[in-house]
Amino acid sequence: MAIVSSDTSPALLLDRFRGPVTNTRPLYPGRIGIEVTDTQGDTWRLVTCDAEYSPSDHESLIGRTVVKTDLEVDGKVVVGFSDGSNFTATPIPDDEEDDIENWSLFMPDRQVLVFGPKGRWRVCSVNDPC
């Protein structure tokens, strides 16, 4: 189970996103959800919102195993798989005050890491709005 404290960085939380991709799904147009099961059998979900992602064929990710993640300065997430391929989610630049998050990581302990808008990140409970 993920343990989150006030000094836990987004990169450290993403480092816990490891294991086989057990499900993917297209969400609202232009969004994708990727579900990973970790070694304890817990489910993690990476969901894009206001981000471009590649590859766009969500079904091609099922069965691959996440072995690393990188969080770049601009908020781009690169998910590396054991076969050497990658999934990337690149934030779309924010121009408006009411922009939405770029991506979210839902963790097994009912916490969610939210990135964006404007490069901000926060961790909150799925039961309480961020």
Image (spheres, rainbow, N blue to C red):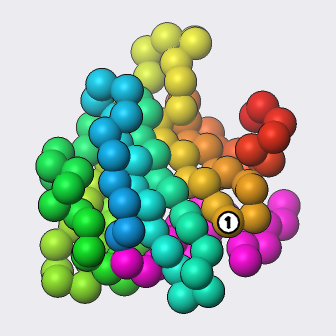
Q: Is residue 62 left or right of residue 75?
A: left
In percent of width and height, residue 10 lies at 61, 60
Q: Which residue is mark 1?
A: 108
Q: Position of residue 27 (x, y in %)?
A: 37, 34
> Which image quarter is the N terminus in?
bottom right
| Residue 50 position (above or below residue 17) | above
Question: Depth check: 67 or 91 in front?
Answer: 67
Q: Tag 1, which secondary structure?
A: loop
Quarter of the figure with the C terminus: top right
Name the residue at 54% across, 88% down.
39
As for residue 16 lying within the magenta part, the answer is yes
Residue stretch in magenta: 1-20
Task: Determine crowd level at label 1: few under 14, some 14-19, many 20+ residues with C-alpha closer than 10 A.
Answer: some
Which is the main secondary structure of the residues drawn in magenta?
loop
- Which quarter of the picture shows residue 20? bottom left
Q: Is 125 included in the stretch rendered in magenta? A: no
The residue under the point 78% across, 73% down is: 3
Task: Answer with the quarter of the image where residue 43 lies.
Answer: bottom right
Please, what is the three-letter code of the amino acid marked with disc 1? Pro
What is the count of numbered marks? 1
In the rendered image, residue 115, in percent from the top left (x then y), is placed at 56, 43
Apparent side of residue 34 relative to residue 98 in the rendered image (left or right): left
The residue closer to the viewer here, 29 or 54, is 29
Image location (x, y in percent) of residue 33: 40, 48
